[in-house]
Each structure stands twice: as C-alpha cells, then as structure tokens.
Amino acid sequence: MPIIEDVRQIIASHGKLPVDVATLADDADLYAAGLSSFASVQLMLALEERFDIEFPETMLNRKTFSSIGAISSAVAELAPDEQVA
Amino acid sequence: MDMQSSLLDRLLDAGLLIDTGIDGLYGRSGAFEDVIARFEKLIDAHAPADARPEVIRFPPGMNRKHFEGSGYMKSFPQLAGTVHSFCGCELDHMNLLQCIAEGGDWTEGQKATDVVLTPAACYPLYPVVAKRGPLPAGGGLFDLQSYCFRHEPSKDPARMQLFRMREFVRMGTPDQVMEFREDWMERGQKLISAVGLDVELDTANDPFFGRAGKMMGNSQREQKLKFELLIPVTSSANKTACLSFNYHQDHFGTTWGLTTADGATAHTACVGFGLERITLALFARHGLETADWPADVRKALWG
C-alpha cells in the first residue's frame, strides 16, 4: 500500500480528529482540523510502529505532522523502501 | 566544588536551610520564611487592584481520581509522587516490622491511598471549579498557594522535591485568558525588578517525559504556550526559571468539562511563582543576612 494511504488510515485510527480524514486534502492543516498535541504524539508512535522507523529529535515538531503530505514525506525519508505513491 | 553545591553549602552553614539527609528536602529557617511571607505580600501589591481573585488554599495532596483525570501521568510520570499506606491485618503488621528490622523492602505491601501529592498548585482547582457548573459571565480568577512535590532529587537548591508555588489562574474565553497572561508577564518583570534581581523573559517548555515528550515540548515552544522569567540563582550563565506564564488553551477545559457562561469550552492560563526559587535568588544576590540587603530592596519587602 502506498505510504500516503497508510498514513491516512493511521490518522483515522489515532488522530482523534473531529472530521472524517477522507474529506481532508493531502496539504490540509491537521492542527486546524483539530489534531491535538496528545493525539499527534500517539500518531507519531503509531507511525513508528507501522513503518518500523524512529523519528529523529529534529523531526519531532509540529511541522512534521502538520499535514497528510508532510507526514508521508517524513515517513518516505525514514523508510526509503516503502512505496511512496 | 561547583557553584550549585557551594550555594547550598552556604545556605546550610548559615542555617537558612536545614539538612534532612535527603537532597531537595530541607527545613526552612525563620529568616527564610520571613522573606517568603514578605515576597507574597509584594505579589499581592503588584496584582491588579480591581481583580479580586477567589482565594483558595488546598493542602499539598489531591484527590487521586482528579490526578488521574488530569493526564499528569501522560506527561510527567517521572515526577509524580503517590501516597501509599499500610492496609494489612495484625499478622501483616508483624511481618512488616520483621522486614524493617531485617532491612528488607517493607514498602512492597503498602497500598495506594486516594491521595496523590500535588504536582502544581492549580491541579486540584480545575475539577473543583468545573463541578460548580459554567463560569460566571466575566470568567474565573483564582489565587492559590500550595506545597508541590516533584520527584527529582538534586543538589541544586533551586530544584527542591517539596516547594511552594503561588499561582493566579484565569479561566474564560481565549481573549480573557491571553490578556491575563500578557498583563502578568509585565507585572512579573516589574515585581522582580523591584527586589533588585535581573530578569530575562524567554519561551520555555515543560519537562515532558521521553521522546513523545520531546515532541510535546517542541510543540509547546512553537506555539509559545509557556514563558518563563529567568533569574540567576546558582549561576548567572544558567539562570533559573522563577516565574512561569502558561496558556493551557482548552486542555483543562476539555479535560474537566469546564465551560464559559455561554456554554463554550473554557480556556485557562496561569502565572506561577516559585517562592523558594525567588527567595534563593534574593539570598544569592543580596547576601545571606537580610539586614544587609540594599535599602530599596528592604523597603520593597519590609516597608
């Protein structure tokens, strides 16, 4: 499965968003859509487990998790063997 | 000898702090307590005259259910202190005494009570206020002070395990609580300048636990949710946070169902004064004899 589809699924199950993830564009601001700090941490941990990666400290910020596209790019950088799209 | 232990040693030698054998757990002398009491009066004098906060003093323990609900364990599990007690029968008691006599781990059988040590003065407040129903039209303003516990033993006298925190907490609309925080950032700097201490305002983050905590901390900084007033205590290079100004957004409002008069989720903010840290900064800067402090500082504190 392409990374971005996996990311969408993980956001749906761990993002605790008040809106349906399917309605969000790849570049939509997840914080504006209701992503809380706690939920973004849970999202980070779920992504690490799914893709068997570890986000370096430099990536542990709001920007990395700001949109479905941003998250997918970060994952693609850390898991080069995954299918990007 | 490093700077930190030297200030601690000087405070202990002067009898201002009294050693208990545990790092971060000290008795305080009459002179030390007098400075704390005077500084608290100065806080009152610098507060807005028309604010009229509701004064509440909680003991340094809080309802365990409220502690669990606050989410403190998500963020700071390493700092929390829980209260455990012996709940056994007479035979258990005999075994307990034998275990102590043999130098064993007698605490293994202790059971958690319904009390947790208060980690920050405002933690017991939110559920209590939420239980009253929606806030009044102008929101809420509270004046708190409590001993707080954080499990972080250290030789740094500015990092005590049990210390007092004075707080003002504002609850209401985002505009109301942000205005409160801005106002206190100015008042706090004037207050500290009035007692002859150098101040520096900076963005900060709480010591959230682990890698997830790193992300929480970065996020807190990026959103400028926490500011600290840094003052030299043990070193002028590594200053100590003595006041903090925190915007919790709707975190406590959502957690406790705290609402404004028109039914919206309340936002909250607080300003916290580390009373021991400020007092230590005063002794470090002006000397260990309060009688020898500069005249303007003495006048500000003692009138």
Image: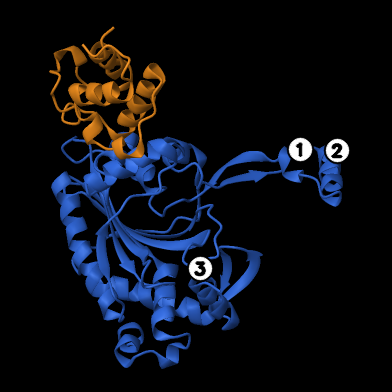
Q: Going 15% across and 55% down the picture, which residue do you hit?
A: B179
Q: Quadrant of the C terminus of chain B?
A: bottom left
**Colour in which chain B is drawn:** blue
Q: Quadrant of the N terminus of chain B?
A: bottom right
For marks 3 and 1, give the CA distance. Answer: 38 Å
Return the x and y of residue B233 as percentages of the image width and height.
41, 72
Is B213 in front, or is B60?
B213
Within-10-Å neighbours for mark 1: few <14, some 14–19, many 20+: few
Image disc number at residue B220: none
**In what element is the residue under mark 2?**
helix
**In what element is the residue under mark 3?**
loop
Image disc number at residue B91: 2
Chain drawn orange, letter?
A
Q: Chain of mark 3?
A: B
Return the x and y of residue B48 as percentages of the image width and height.
20, 67
Return the x and y of residue B92 as percentages of the image width and height.
82, 38
Residue type at mark 3? Pro
For marks 3 and 2, give the CA distance. Answer: 42 Å
Image disc number at residue B88: 1
Of callouts 3 and 1, the N-terminal one: 1
The vertical placement of B264 against B152, above or below, is above
